[in-house]
Amino acid sequence: MSVLLGIDIGGSGSRVAIRSGDGPRRELTGPRIGVTTGGSSVPETAIALLRRARELWPRECAALDGVGLGASGLATLVARPDELARAMRAELAGTSADRLSPVAVAIDAVTAHLGALGGRPGAIVALGTGAIAFGTDGLEIWRRVDGWGHLLGDRGGGAWIGNRGLEMAMRAHDGVDASGAALLVRARARFGDPLEWPAQLYTRDDRAGVLAGFVPEVAELAASGDVAATAIMAAAGEEAARSGVAALAPGLAARLAATGGVFGAGGVLASSFARTVTALRADVEVTAPLGDPLDGALLLAGRVARGEVSTHEPYVWTAGSIAR
């Protein structure tokens, strides 16, 4: 019976789960990451989650067969992902004198893909705090689209939606566009006086997560028919569709899954996504995700345990894995 540990780290939070054999996963939550001039806090968050897992599940962690991690910004904001894999393996070495688990760390799109498609070829588009699309067959085809962070991309993701919602609210506050009036009311209730918003956002290392926290307000207003909010959610669906279709590289199965918490908003975002995918490529099969990114991290852990995955930069890095 294999014992696997999976970790999912993103801008809105983090999770670690353990699974023994075919049993249910047990999990706990952790903090969201921040980004400073020194880079991302992913490594610190990963090690902290491992330590919490060891405290909560000491017997299971002493018998781990494999560990998988998926993290936002791993390829772009963490200087040495390979060192993180080794550090995680060293951290777990203290649980057993004669057992050293192989570790695989990957960009969040890889674990989102594994979770959503269960290892099948195709593409996914994941909308969380950020947004990324990823197409792969797990062997030769690897195609990443977006995931460049809330300043350069993450089109259609939570921070993208939240930022546009606050932009429309501020335009209403400035008296240049009254269509954002309802968004202004919601933003005032959440963030206070608009004069305080710059200090709340510009000075925070987790501002992407703060922006994404405004998504439920935008989605609720869109569901009620507010014009400005509806336009934002529709545009998010269109952007997600464009990224997802772009991730379907030549030779890849025309299969696309939409995953991530922002897709849970449904409504106009989901309908806009489906409509745009069809307009761009009518042959694409849009499928419901089989699981979430934490399921994908556990699947990655199983693969590294069986020697089925090795380092494939800039997407996956392993420590202690002997690929077969």
Image (cartoon, grey):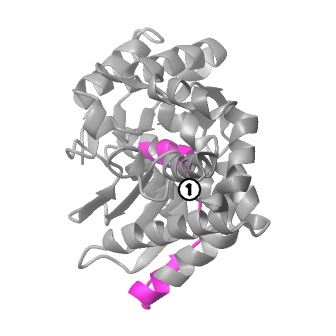
Residue 301 appears anywhere in the view? yes
Residue at image point 58% right, 20% down = 53
Look at the image and say whether residue 273 sits in the magenta stretch: no
Mark 1 crowdedness (10 Å alpha carbons): few <14, some 14-19, many ≥20: few
Residue at image point 40% right, 44% down = 150
* Left or right of 314 on screen, residue 179: right
Q: Position of residue 284 (x, y in %)?
A: 44, 84
Q: Residue furthest bottom?
A: 282
Residue 11 appears anywhere in the view? no
Q: Position of residue 182 (x, y in %)?
A: 73, 54
The quadrant in which residue 102 appears is: top left
Look at the image and say whether residue 281 sits in the magenta stretch: yes
Quadrant location of the N terminus in the rendered image: top right
**The residue stretch that appears in magenta:** 277-300
- In this rendering, is residue 81 above or below 94? below
- In this rendering, is residue 83 above or below 290? above
Q: Position of residue 258 (x, y in %)?
A: 53, 65
Q: Amino acid at mark 1?
A: Val
- In this rendering, is residue 152 above or below 133? above
Q: Residue furthest front?
A: 175
Toward the viewer: 222 or 206? 222
Q: Secondary structure at mark 1?
A: loop
Toward the viewer: 107 or 318? 107
Q: Which residue is mark 1?
A: 176
Q: Position of residue 130 (x, y in %)?
A: 46, 47
Residue at image point 54% right, 49% down = 158
Q: How many marks?
A: 1
